Image: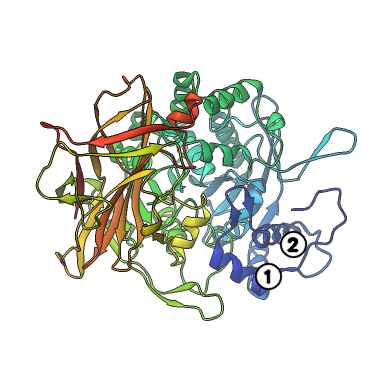
């Protein structure tokens, strides 16, 4: 979005821009919004605040604006927080004296603040809600000036970013106060995406007046601590992307204490303090309060989430006793709902429509079938049908992926299957995955190098391609066996319908490792390998072990991220283990060491194995 001091004319939104958002989502990368999405936000805001000096919107969007204007008053208030910080906000107040509920929308972690989802606010207003959206403190574009000072965009809030801390909880309650004073709502709901979803849960749990009647949390987290540090491994790439995506220099966006904490996290020091900070900002830390308030809560997340991995959301969800629902989708952060909150679709965008239906039932009182929904509804990777677009060469989804309803997360996994790691597999270069245990073998590799076996090419955009029908393919013959170890099954026979294995739930890996160093990182990847030796990733997870005795065996067990995946008949399962992934910290880099030798083995009494969940 342009500098507020610039005189650049806003571009009219084109059908090509809308098509781009529909096809590629709202992100150009983990640290940049797609220019089409930014231009759309700017055009909508200019049209809504009356500063557009020419028509900027296509007919469908202009009609939506006109419909809302005919029944509501649009405002751009500033809300003053308890400590004097001013929060930029956007409001739609429905006309008439009939009491109506309000949906409060704290924006996501985005330089455009509340403006990016202006389309969604208009949709909510037509459904019968007052709307009050705001940018959390510190977020939003900040432009440097030649005199060394800064100027903020109109949607940028004051203060510094509290990262969903106590100041953000208090701000949420202040926004509720504003809504009660200016709208007189019948009920109060919070809807958030990404950063706004965590804030929504935390405000609901902490509001002194217990005034939140329902929550929608899209691309959310349950435990911020384990989202950024789990199994002894720091999620460096995710945190780095977030720090670079606030809208301004980190020295201006964060207070000194938070800057020190971020520096400690990056350096791998004072981790206990980092984890305590993250736990304070974890909705999972306040499950008891949420349960006591019985706040209906809707969750939506993705299998291959790189910012807030799926396991911590599932664990939080399972501990809640409130009316609740969990959707799990193909893709990565914001891929399912990002475009649906931003532009109109020719058909329903289910991730958004189901979120709105949840509000309609629990806030408007609509009898719309939500009360009969299963607790969990999961897409199965990658069961959509596609065709190849002759112009782009990309796949286009012609039939959506299968979704499976379950009465609880516990019902997703109905059995488990143990695959033992063995010395020889179907490829002579690799080990095997077999039904009988084998011990005494070893596989060695040189640790400290990135490999072709990797979780994603890029945060967010790899998962966006998955969501659109183009999952990443891996040429397994290029996996660098000198820097990783591989185990495979033979071709699998069909076991249930057309699927050879219905992976459902959380895989678990046990193996014995020794290293020439006193610490080691292992990153485990589970792949589905086709007859042509190309693979798609099912799931992965890193583990870092420290304070080891060099050359001594250490047996470790860790859980990979949950998955819902159908492995086709004739395909093989492949387990790859390396020492380094660009998403994470690794032991050798932390120790200032270039390389070491890692040996994987299987010992008597605790044979190396993969526990595969089935459903």
Q: Residue at x 45, y 53 (%)?
A: 332
**Mark 1 near mark 2, Cβ–Cβ under 8 Å?**
yes
Residue bearing mark 1 = 62
Q: In this orientation, which residue lies closer to the viewer: 287 or 222? A: 222
Where disc 1 sits, the SS reads helix
Q: In this orientation, which residue lies closer to the viewer: 80 or 479? A: 479
Mark pair 1, 2: CA separation: 9 Å
Mark closer to the chain start, 1 or 2:
2
Residue bearing mark 2 = 47
Q: The C terminus appears in which quarter of the rendering?
A: bottom left
- The x, y position of residue 491, in whole percent, is 20, 63
Q: Residue at x 16, y 32 (%)?
A: 603
Residue farthest to the right? 147
Relative horizontal placement of residue 342, taking residue 281 as reference (left or right): right
Q: In this orientation, which residue lies closer to the viewer: 530 or 130? A: 530
- The x, y position of residue 451, in whole percent, is 44, 47
């Amino acid at each position: 979005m342009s500098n507020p001091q610039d005189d650049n004319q806003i571009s009219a939104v084109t059908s090509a821009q809308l098509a781009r958002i529909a096809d590629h989502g709202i992100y150009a990368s983990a640290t940049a919004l797609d220019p089409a999405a930014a231009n759309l936000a700017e055009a909508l805001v200019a049209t809504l605040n009356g500063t557009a000096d020419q028509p900027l919107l296509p007919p469908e969007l202009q009609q939506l604006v006109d419909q809302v204007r005919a029944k509501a008053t649009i405002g751009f208030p500033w809300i003053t927080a308890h400590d004097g910080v001013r929060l930029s906000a956007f409001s739609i107040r429905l006309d008439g004296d009939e009491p109506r509920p309000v949906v409060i929308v704290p924006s996501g972690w985005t330089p455009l603040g509340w403006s990016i989802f202006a389309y969604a606010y208009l949709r909510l207003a037509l459904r019968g809600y007052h709307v009050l959206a705001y940018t959390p403190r510190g977020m939003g574009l900040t432009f440097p000036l030649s005199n060394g000072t800064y100027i903020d965009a109109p949607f940028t809030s004051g203060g510094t970013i509290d990262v969903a801390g106590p100041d953000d909880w208090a701000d949420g309650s202040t926004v509720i106060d504003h809504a009660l004073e200016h709208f007189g709502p019948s009920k109060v709901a919070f809807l958030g995406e990404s950063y706004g979803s965590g804030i929504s849960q935390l405000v609901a749990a902490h509001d002194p007046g217990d005034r939140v009647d329902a929550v929608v949390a899209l691309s959310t987290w349950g435990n911020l601590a384990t989202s950024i540090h789990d199994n002894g491994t720091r999620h460096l790439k995710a945190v780095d992307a977030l720090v670079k995506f606030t809208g301004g220099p980190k020295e201006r966006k964060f207070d000194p204490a938070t800057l020190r904490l971020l520096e400690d996290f990056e350096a791998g020091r004072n981790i206990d303090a980092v984890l305590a900070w993250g736990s304070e900002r974890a909705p999972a830390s306040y499950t008891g309060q949420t349960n006591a308030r019985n706040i209906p809560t809707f969750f939506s997340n993705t299998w291959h989430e790189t910012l807030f991995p799926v396991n911590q959301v599932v664990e939080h969800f399972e501990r809640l006793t409130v009316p609740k629902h969990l959707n799990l989708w193909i893709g990565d952060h914001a891929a399912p709902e990002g475009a649906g909150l931003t532009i109109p679709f020719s058909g329903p965008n289910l991730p958004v429509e189901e979120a709105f239906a949840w509000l309609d039932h629990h806030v408007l009182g609509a009898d719309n079938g939500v009360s009969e929904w299963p607790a969990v509804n999961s897409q199965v990777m990658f069961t959509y049908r596609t065709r190849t677009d002759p112009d782009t060469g990309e796949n286009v989804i012609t039939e959506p992926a299968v979704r499976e309803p379950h009465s609880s997360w516990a019902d997703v996994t109905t059995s488990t299957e143990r695959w033992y790691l063995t010395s020889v597999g179907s490829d002579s270069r690799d080990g095997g995955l077999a039904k009988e245990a084998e011990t005494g073998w070893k596989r060695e590799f040189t640790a400290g190098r990135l490999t072709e076996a990797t979780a994603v090419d890029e945060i967010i955009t790899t998962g966006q391609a998955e969501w659109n029908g183009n999952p990443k393919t891996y040429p397994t013959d290029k996996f660098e066996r000198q820097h990783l170890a591989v185990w495979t099954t033979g071709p699998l026979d069909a076991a249930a319908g057309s699927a050879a294995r219905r992976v459902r739930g959380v895989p678990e890996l046990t193996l014995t490792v020794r290293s020439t160093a006193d610490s080691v990182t292992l990153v485990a990847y589970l792949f589905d390998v086709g007859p042509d030796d190309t693979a798609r990733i099912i799931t992965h997870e890193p583990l870092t072990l420290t304070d080891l005795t060099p050359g001594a065996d250490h047996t470790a067990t860790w859980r990979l991220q949950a998955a819902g995946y159908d492995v086709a008949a004739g395909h093989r399962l492949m387990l790859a283990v390396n020492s380094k992934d660009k998403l994470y910290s690794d032991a050798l880099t932390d120790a200032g060491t270039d390389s070491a030798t890692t040996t994987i083995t299987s010992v008597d009494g605790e044979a190396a194995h993969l526990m595969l969940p089935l459903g």
